[in-house]
Image: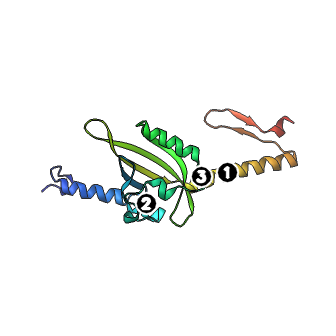
Amino acid sequence: MSDPLFRIDDLTLWLSVLEKIVDTSTNMVVLTDAERRIKWVNATYTRITGWTLPECIGKRPSELLHGPETSAEDRAHLARLLSSGETVRDFELVNYRKNGDPYRVCLSIEALRDGEGQASAYLSIQSDVTDRHRQQLNAIELKQQLEAAQRLARLGRIEVDAVTGVSSWSSEVFR
């Protein structure tokens, strides 16, 4: 007896397996139509944004998610990419939850094309990268504080990249 999971001819089984994979993903998944109106979102999208599927249907993601810190320049760039039919990869911007809290998202958006090559829908995979972004900002701030402390204490440092062997010296070493 063969494992039913591997029966290619049972499309209903495969569809239910794929639906389960998408719905339990740690990434937000959004399906929109050609006009970029939401048709479906997964449970992770609802958990992170606070917007349920019935609240989302027929709305554009920008109507629900963009706010004061969402860069107009980033929005325009994203619109140009989508209008030109390009695949969007690793595009970061600030979105907002239903409760108004901002979060940083990394988007990948793929046009789903019909038989004539026209975009008939868009599939968006989104990752909440707020914590990673916050850690990067903290690292920059800590480095600036270290450099200020070294200037005050007149201490220098030399860093060597273990892989390339390239060294970098702080300005205090030169002084």
Q: Residue at x 26, y 57 (%)?
A: 17
Q: In the drawing, what numbered circle is on residue 139?
A: 1
Residue that mark 3 sits on: 133
User: Residue 63's x, y, as percent?
Assistant: 48, 56
Q: Residue at x 79, y 46 (%)?
A: 147
Q: Of 43 and 1, which appears nearest the observer?
A: 43
Q: Secondary structure at mark 1?
A: helix
Q: Is residue 42 left or right of residue 149?
A: left
Residue that mark 2 sits on: 45
Classify the position of the N terminus by image quarter.
bottom left
Q: Of 155 and 4, which appears nearest the observer?
A: 4
Q: Residue at x 33, y 57 (%)?
A: 21
* Mark 3 burial class by Cα count in 10 Å: few <14, some 14-19, many 20+: some
Q: Residue at x 29, y 55 (%)?
A: 18
In this view, 71 is above or below 117: below
- Looking at the image, tell me whether mark 2 or mark 1 is earlier in sequence order: 2
- Looking at the image, tell me whether mark 3 or mark 2 is earlier in sequence order: 2
| Type of amino acid under label 1 | Ala
* Mark 1 burial class by Cα count in 10 Å: few <14, some 14-19, many 20+: few
| Type of amino acid under label 2 | Tyr
